[in-house]
Image (cartoon, grey):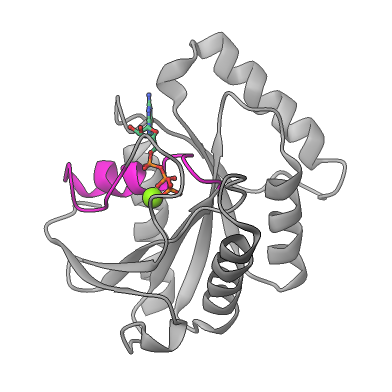
């Protein structure tokens, strides 16, 4: 899939204010600082379409990007940002949960995981919640440029082992880097295939 146009549309805190649409939508979620906004920029060939930051907690709203004028990418706030106040964490959690539960054209959630990290409780919990609510998701390992190929393979294997304690099979996953653009084609092809499945 080739991205010809990518346009920022709107930033909201209430899912009801998201663009009214039946076009396919894909949302990026994961811990703060995992690289959600950077991945959106990498996929769309833009350096500043989604706002990124070295400091966790940058994205605090639901951000819609309109791609090729026929599908959406959505950048969500990160969860598990310990330095945010409890009230803020609960508020962001509520925004995310409502959006995911009620957004009818959401086709798939991309759960981003930093490839260097051990499986973390709140990521595992979040994926269980998606499963319980029948929300389709895939895993995207980020920051692959920080490891060598052997370390990447070991890290993925370790993650699989933990997932297999709860899941019958490992969800579809991609290994990516916003720095080297690793995984770009894989993610875009997945979206392209999902889009054509929906439009048939
Ligand atoms: P919040 O909006 O705060 O939830 O964070 P986010 O998940 O959107 O992360 P963001 O894209 O802002 O990136 C956080 C930091 O990680 C930035 O300093 C990025 O430059 C860096 N980063 C993101 N992706 C990669 C990557 O693939 N490789 C490397 N080396 N750094 C990355
Ligand atoms: Mg962000």
Looking at this view, name the residue that lies furthest to the right: 165
Q: Is residue 109 above or below residue 14?
A: above
Q: Is residue 51 magenta?
A: yes
Image: magenta residue range = 31-52
Q: Is residue 165 left or right of residue 179?
A: right
State whether residue 200 appears in this view. Answer: no
**Which of the 4 image quarters holds residue 55?**
top left
- Residue 66 position, x and y percent, is 23, 69
- Residue 25 position, x and y percent, is 39, 71
Looking at this view, name the residue that lies furthest to the left: 4
Q: Is residue 191 magenta?
A: no
Q: How many marks?
A: 0
State whether residue 197 appears in this view. Answer: yes
Q: Is residue 100 above or below residue 177?
A: below
Residue drawn at 42 percent across, 64 percent down: 26
**Which of the 4 image quarters holds residue 118?**
top right
**Which of the 4 image quarters holds residue 176?**
top left
Residue drawn at 44 percent across, 28 percent down: 143
Q: Nearer the viewer, residue 59 or 6?
A: 59
Residue drawn at 49 percent across, 14 percent down: 147
């Amino acid at each position: 899939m080739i991205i010809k146009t990518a346009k920022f549309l709107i930033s909201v805190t209430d899912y009801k204010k998201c663009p009214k649409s039946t076009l396919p939508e894909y949302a990026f979620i994961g811990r703060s600082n995992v690289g959600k906004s950077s991945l959106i920029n990498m996929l769309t060939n833009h350096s500043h379409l989604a706002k990124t930051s070295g400091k966790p907690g940058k994205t605090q709203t639901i951000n819609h990007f309109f791609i090729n004028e026929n599908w959406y990418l959505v950048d969500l706030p990160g969860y598990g940002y310990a330095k945010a106040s409890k009230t803020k964490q609960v508020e962001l959690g509520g925004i995310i949960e409502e959006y995911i539960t009620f957004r009818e054209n959401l086709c798939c959630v991309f759960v981003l995981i930093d490839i260097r990290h051990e499986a973390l409780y709140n990521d595992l919990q979040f994926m269980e919640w998606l499963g319980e609510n029948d929300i389709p998701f895939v895993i995207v390992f980020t920051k692959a440029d920080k490891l060598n190929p052997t370390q990447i393979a070991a890290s993925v294997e370790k993650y699989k082992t933990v997932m297999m304690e709860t899941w019958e099979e490992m969800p579809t996953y991609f290994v990516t880097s916003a720095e080297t653009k690793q995984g770009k084609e894989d993610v875009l092809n997945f979206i392209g295939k999902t889009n054509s499945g929906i439009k048939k």
